[in-house]
Image (cartoon, rainbow, N blue to C red):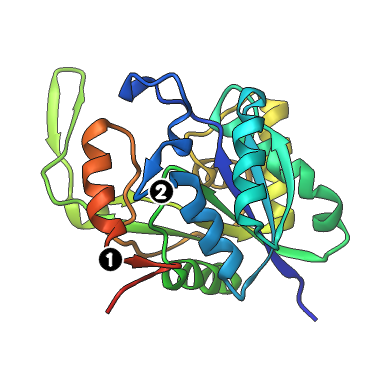
Amino acid sequence: MSGGVAAIILAGGSGSRMQKEINKVYLPISNRDMLEFSIETMDRSPFIERIVLVVRDEDRPNAELLIGETMPSKLTDVVTGGSTRHESEEAGLEQLAESIEDGSIELVAIHDGARPFMTLDLLESVIAAARNSGGAIPGLEVEEPLFRHQDDNVELLEQTALRRVQTPQAFRARPLLLAYRRAREAGFQGVDTAETIERFSDLSITVVPGDPHNIKVTFVEDFFAAEGYALEWEKGRWKK
């Protein structure tokens, strides 16, 4: 019998790019904290058995208030992250380590809480692909030309081979945990989960079609787009 799937939601960012003192994931979208959208979708997914929320210490009151108001049934742990995204991912994985090592967790999906519009369908697609190949990430085609500049040479990159990567990203749990432990020993920190897997494991990574609405809310203007998306959003799915 295969093990279950756990989710790690990263909520350790800040509002610095929007010139806000509060962590942006607690700012409102359609009268709901941004973070609530991702927690609700993970909680509603039939594939997710356990959720770990990674926060900053100073945000614990906000996190506890949100959890108390929404009562997600699968959110079992709230842990303190590190000063970087990589360290926060590692903190979430170490919280799951015992269940990973005994085989009760087979896959881990890691998601950025600043991407509120992850759909249940996208989450299912990533998990299914990860079960098949060992790892999966959602990616969007690159629409604008990209160039590599090196040693005074400029090279146009082949757009068909490039993708803009999103979350959730899902991987087999044991190789994922081991990769982060190897990265710590090497003093390495990746920009996202896939980079660490690529460098410190033998897992294959499948790219599944991403969702253009699965935006990362980073700047003030992103909130205007998010407010519009929220009008068409209902519990992990787009309204028909």
Badge 2 or badge 1: first in the primary sequence: 2
Label ID, residue 115 = 2
Place of residue 41 in the rendered image (x, y in percent of width and height, measured from the top left): 51, 63
Residue 89 appears in view: no
Q: Secondary structure at mark 1?
A: loop
Residue beneath disc 1: 232
Residue 64 or residue 11, whichever sits in front: 64
Place of residue 240 in the rendered image (x, y in percent of width and height, measured from the top left): 27, 79
Residue 118 appears in view: yes
Q: Secondary structure at mark 2?
A: loop
Place of residue 146 in the rendered image (x, y in percent of width and height, measured from the top left): 16, 39
In this view, 229 is above or below 60 = below
Q: Mark 2 vs mark 1: give the one in front.
A: 1
Residue 187 or residue 164, whichever sits in front: 164
Would you say 144 lies left or right of 52 here?
A: left
Which amino acid type is shown beneath numbered disc 1?
Answer: Glu
- Separation of residues labelled 2 and 1 (CA atoms): 16 Å
Q: Residue at x 42, y 59 (%)?
A: 118
Would you say 31 lies left or right of 182 here?
A: left
